[in-house]
Structures are given as C-alpha cells and as structure tokens.
Amino acid sequence: MPKNLYTKNALKEAIAGKLQRHFACEVADATKDQIYEACALVVRDALTEHMIQTQNEVEKYGERQVHYLCMEFLVGRSLRNNAYNLGMLDELTAALKEMGYEMADIFEQEADPGLGNGGLGRLAACYMDGMATTGVRGTGYSIRYEHGIFKQKIEDGQQVELPDSWLASGDVWQIPAMDDTREVRIGGTIDTHFDENGKLVVEYHDYTPVLAVPYDMPISGYDTGNIARLRLWEAKSPIALDMKLFSSGEYLKALEKHAMAETISMVLYPEDNHREGQSLRLKQQYFLVSATLQDICAKHKAKYGTLANFAHKHVLHINDTHPTLVIPELMRILMDDNDMSWENAWNITSQSVAYTNHTVMPEALECWPVSLVQELMPRIMQIIHEINERFCRDLWNYFPNDFQKISRLAIVSDGIVRMAHLAIAGSFSINGVSALHSDILKERVFKDFYTIYPAKFRNVTNGIAHRRWLCEANPKLAALIESKIGKGYRKHPSELQVLANYGEDKALLAQLGQIKRDNKLRLAEYIKEHNGIEVNMDSIFDVQVKRLHEYKRQMLNILHIISLYHKLKDNPGMDFVPRTFVFGSKAAPGYAVAKKTIQLIHSIANMINNDPDIGDKLKVVFIEDYKVSLAEMIMPAAEISEQISIAGKEASGTGNMKFMMNGALTIGTMDGANVEICEAVGRENIFIFGMETPEAEALAASGNYEPMLIYQNDPVIKRVMDHMIHGFGDGVDYTDLANLLLHGGNGGPADRYMSLKDFSSYAVAQERVGEMYRRPENWNYMSLMNIANSGRFAADRSVAEYAQNIWRVKTNFAF
Ligand code: 73E
C-alpha cells in the first residue's frame, strides 16, 4: 500500500496551489467548480504517479496482461472513488471543511460520465475497480464518445432526450497520450497478390483514414499502488491536411471523409439489449478494435521483436460480441503486417481471445450484412470468409452431411455475418454472467457449439464494486458494519458473512433500521425538491430502477400498483401498509412501447398521488434522468428491490446485487443472478414468485398462452386492464399498451413477457412483503442476512475468477 502522503494541511496547500496555477485565484474567491477541479487535479497527480509505476512494472516483469474491450464503460464520478481508494477521503473531507466547503457539495460538481447504457457498461467499470484492487494488470479500452447516454427530461409525462456533453467538465481525469495515436482505415478497396517471393501483398486504395487518439483514465484500486488504465479512443480526421485532394479540386469528397471520420466517436448508441444495424455502429466497433490491437501489437513488438509469443503475454477479453472484430483484425495484423501463416495466426488469435455473452435476447444478438462489412472493411470481410470456410469444414467432421445444421452454425450464411458464432469460433473461452444464464447458453442458445467445444464454456457470475456501492454510497451502513466486523471486508468481501452472527443483536437491528430511515429521508428530500411529492417516511420504499425494457416487466409492477389503488379506493379505511413506488429508467429513443410505458407511469402517478382518498398510503414517483450518481443515492434508501423479469431473460442483473448489499429485500423471479441471491440468503429472506425458466419457456413454445383467458377469469386483472383501456383521466390513450397485453402486436404474441400470467403470484408475494414490514425487527433481520450474504457478489470475486479460470493471471484475492 502506498502511504497517503497527504495530511489535511498538505491537501489544503496542494488545492490552493492548483487554484493559483490553474485559475489564478485564491481559495476565498474560488467557485465550487474550481474547488472541485483543484481537488481532482491533486488526486490525479497521486494517481498518475501510481500509473507510471504500474506501467513500469508491467514493462519490467512482462507478466500476462488483460485487455478488456467494451463499447461502454459507465464509470460514474471519480473524485470520491479515487480519494477513498487512495485512503485520503477523510483528510480531503476535513481539508474542504476547513476551507468552508461540504465534501458532498464539491462532489456534486463533477459530471457523471454517461459512457454506457446500463448493466453491461457499469459491469465493465466495476471490473476495472476489481482488477486494480486484486492486482491484475488490466487495461480497459473503449470510445471517448463526445456525447454519452442522453439526458432524460420528462415533459408532460413523456421522455424527451437531450444531448449530454459531459466532456465540458469531465475531462480532468483523462490524460491524452498523443504519442500512441494510431490510424484506422475505413472503406475503400483492396488488391491482394503475391510478390515475386511468394509473400502476400495487400494494397489499400481510396480508404478513409481515421486517427485514433487515446485518452487514459487511471482507475485506482483500493489500498494498493496498482492502477488499472482505461484507454478511451477519440476519432480525428487527418484529412483536413490532405492538400492533394484539395488541390485537385475534390473539396467535397475531402470534407465528406473528414466529417465521416470525426463522427465515429460523436455519440454512444442509446440502445440496451438491442442491436442497431447502422453502419456507424459497425465503424465504431472496428475503430475500437483496430486502434486497440495496433496499440497492443506495436508495444509488444517493440519489446519482444516478434508477435509469436503474443498469446502468452496478452488476453483480449471481449465484452459481448460488440468487439468481435478483434478476431479478424488480429489475423490481419499477424498475416499482412507480420508475414505469419494462416495456421500460426489462427493459433495465436484463438488462444488470445475470451468472450463473455451478456444476453439471450434474440433482438440483441448481433448480425451484420456481408455487404456492409465488405464495404467498410474489405480485408476484414475476406478474412471472415476464410475463417468461415475452415470452420464449416470442421463442422462437417462433427456433423457429416447435416447441411442444415452446418448452415445454422456457420459464421457467414444467407449474406449475414453472425458475430456470436465468430466469437465462439475464434476464442478459447465463452462465459455467461450467472449460473442460470451460463446453463441456458449451454443447453439452448449455443447448444451445438457446446457439444463441439464443451471445455470452452464457463460461468462467471457478475459482481459489483462493493466499495463504491456500499462503503462510499452508504457510509453510515459501512460504519455500522465496521464497528462489528472491522474493515477487512473492504478487501475480503466474504468477511461480510460474519455479520450473520449478529442476528440476535437487537440494538444492531434497530441501528440498521435507523440508518435505512436516514437514507430514505435523503431520498425523500430529493423527491420533494425534484418531483414536488411529499412521501410518507413510514411507507415501504419499493424501487425499480433499470433500463426500460418489456422483458424487465416494469409493466407487471404498474399493473400491481393499479390493483392496489383499486383496493384502497374500495376500502379507504383498510389496514394497509403504505407504499412508495419509485421508478427510474431511460427508454431507447426509438423504442415506442418503452417510452409509452414511461408515460403510463406518469399517468398513474398523477391519478394516485392526487387522490385524497389515497392520501399518503400510496405514492408513485418517477425519478428523472436515472444515472450512476442517482443510483448511489437510491440504492441505500431502498427497502424493496424489484427484480421481476420473466424467467430466462435477464442474463444476470447487477442492480439486484447493489440493493441487496445495501440491505433491501428482493422481490423477484428465479431469473439471472436472483437465483444465486436466493441461494445465498435462503428462501425465507427473499420474496420469490412466478414461473421458473422451464415453465416460462415451455409455455411460450407451446403457443397456448392466452392472456385473454386470464383477463376474463381474474376480476382483479380485468378491472386493471379495463381501467387502462378507459384511461386515467388525463386524456392519454393507453389502448395500444393494453392491446399488446391482450391481443399482441408489433409482430409479437399477446403479452409476450407474460406479465398477466405472473400477476397473481406477484400480488401474493407483495402481500407477504406488507405483512413482513409490520414486524420491523424481523424485517431488519432479513435485511441483515442480505447484507451478510452479499460478499460473493463483489466484483473482486468475479475478477479473481476470471483471472484464475480464464485469463490465467495472478491475483492477490483470497477466495
Ligand atoms: O442482465 C444484464 C447483465 O447483468 C444484461 O441485460 C446486460 O448486461 C448486464 C451485465 O452482464 C446486457 N446489456 C446488453 N446485453 N446484455 C447490451 C446489448 C447491446 C447493447 C448494449 C447493451
């Protein structure tokens, strides 16, 4: 552990120094923003020092390095995280206090970089933290999007998307590394021939050169000098300098190429669990992959003079199929630029790449038209064709004469490139992100591949950065935990288990309840300020925050809330445990059903929140612009965590882990990592309901699911659906959503995600929630059991499993 050289006074001095040099101002005249930036610069200095040391060690020892490629890194704010990890948070807080500032106010000045959509991007960020902490030599690679995920505004109950320009105040943490700029070639044509020595020559004509300029974010580990580096590539055009084009009068063509090049890193695609078939997305993927590989290969060659030992020194981890072009791109570099034979290049490539699958949603499995790949990266398409041919020959040995199967499993078929098949063929490891999901991959989605390559398939259940999500986001809870079990769990999260010994400790249970109440109060104040809604502090804070997607079934939650409203309207005096339902969710701008669902939440919120019969027994709150920094406030305040996707569809979920770690109880289906959460806490400490995967899959496959019958036979559901059809008094028509549930549409069956089918068991589980809440001591006990058993969902554990079973690199993590 590097010593924290910064005492309170040293920090004050350093901050004042930064203010002077960067803003030419004294502490007394500085704005909060300037104070924030000065603090960030001070912390950054400490980080860069460690980063250089880490890089030097990597150079010196030549250990195997992990390169984690992902189109998204949802890093969240950095100042508090880095100060905590470097062990200087308390001193910084004290220094700011003496300068007349509240730490929390200063942290609020930082932009929340939105370089991701949801779970996939946040997971990548948590793993950077895990790698840094457990001593893995890791680098993340992504794109420096000028505009991250859009800012969500709600106007008249509807989502409006505004551009997010995070770079204006968010670039303190990024250190440009201009010397490592690379050139990526897009489009054009190629000529391949053999020269007089029989050597393959590939000539490129008329392509668009795009410069990839790297910016490095140092990511600190906790209590270690090891730094993980996140390298973000920005696309720049060199074309403006192309005087040849200008002088030959081809201005427009030059400008067009210039604009195309710079567009590549302009914006993050805002679709989650959905593929976007646009050519810009494919260019982004190739840009990331090509810049990254050129960078790694150039450094490797400078050190070893050859790429022959590449696979011994590097793992290329691809986070879902989005960076799958690493496979043909590495082949290209090895063969075209380094004269390697196909066989040698293939051995190296397929021993270097590991692939994590994150979704089984068919609409998210990536396919690209051959014609588009051909147009944008002709050499890459040539290589993919060759990989496919050899792969199909292999398949023929496994499935002789089974043309249909071979065509189903082929990488290229019917004019389409299937990225998952390419990823499986070209990697040495394929893993799912929860036990259930990994089984589904083996048994269903990639069944035939599993029979061919059983040894390639693994599971690594997701994990979260517990220091960010527990220690930093919920300092009161962390302090309580530490008063009982010490600080060891910060590095050894399984030590949280010791808390289970305190189940009988009434004082502790009461303190747990009090901390939850304090956190609820903070959220309630936020809601009052931003939504103008006064929530009941004695109500259950029941929270569903995640992307809006039909399979995640926000609809099931909404239907149930409407049914509670009916119950209360019928009997306003009934003995009812009050509820505050909190939603936070962005919908992809082109996803009409998701956007309409957000509107529906607002319509029912208006009706319920303003009904005097209901009073403070029921409130519905939609938190605008859900993002990492808001999640850090919401998770500690939640009492119920809604994890209610249809079984078999949510690969893992990670919000479920953050809630659990903060003492919320889960109401959920047996889906994704909920299954392992249930196993960890025991059935008695979680509210499980609904169909399990086999039943849900069989029912969908049978074609016999008829939600109309449920509607006709269940009066509660009938009344809810009728209410939706008649509207909620604000003139907005919801027959479209009701029709989707009862009759189907958009090419899908009625109630595709079977909300009506699971409704009654959900309602029963919710009733149990209410009953349990009447007994605070029992509730707090359950809460404690959730915290105590959450250690296995720490990112440190996931990263250590990757390191041990897939990457084959050392860590200092003790299982
Ligand atoms: O279940 C989550 C999982 O916890 C899954 O839906 C999500 O990944 C999380 C982390 O493993 C995910 N996102 C995407 N695919 N799976 C995705 C797909 C395309 C674009 C953006 C995101």
Image (tube, helix red, strand yellow):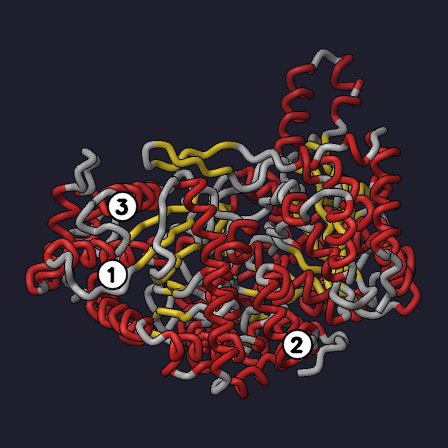
Vertical placement of 661 versus 382: above or below? below
Question: Of label 2 and label 1, which has the lower sequence position?
Answer: 2
Which label sits on residue 489? 2
How packed mark 3 is, by other alpha carbons closer than 10 Å (few <14, some 14-19, many 20 or more), is many
Given residues 406 and 718, the one toward you in this image is 718
Nearer to us of marks 2 and 1 is 2
Q: Is residue 691 visible?
A: no
Q: Is mark 3 within 8 Å of ligand 1?
A: no
Which label sits on residue 268? none
Residue 222: x, y in percent?
74, 66
Badge 1 is on which residue? Answer: 755
Q: What secondary structure is marked by label 3?
A: helix
How packed mark 2 is, by other alpha carbons closer than 10 Å (few <14, some 14-19, many 20 or more), is some
Are the residues flagged by discs 2 and 1 in contact, CB closer than 8 Å? no
Badge 3 is on which residue? Answer: 609
The residue at the point 17 percent across, 38 percent down is 729
| Separation (CA) of disc 1 from disc 3 | 24 Å
Q: Amino acid at mark 1?
A: Ser
The residue at the point 70 percent across, 78 percent down is 488
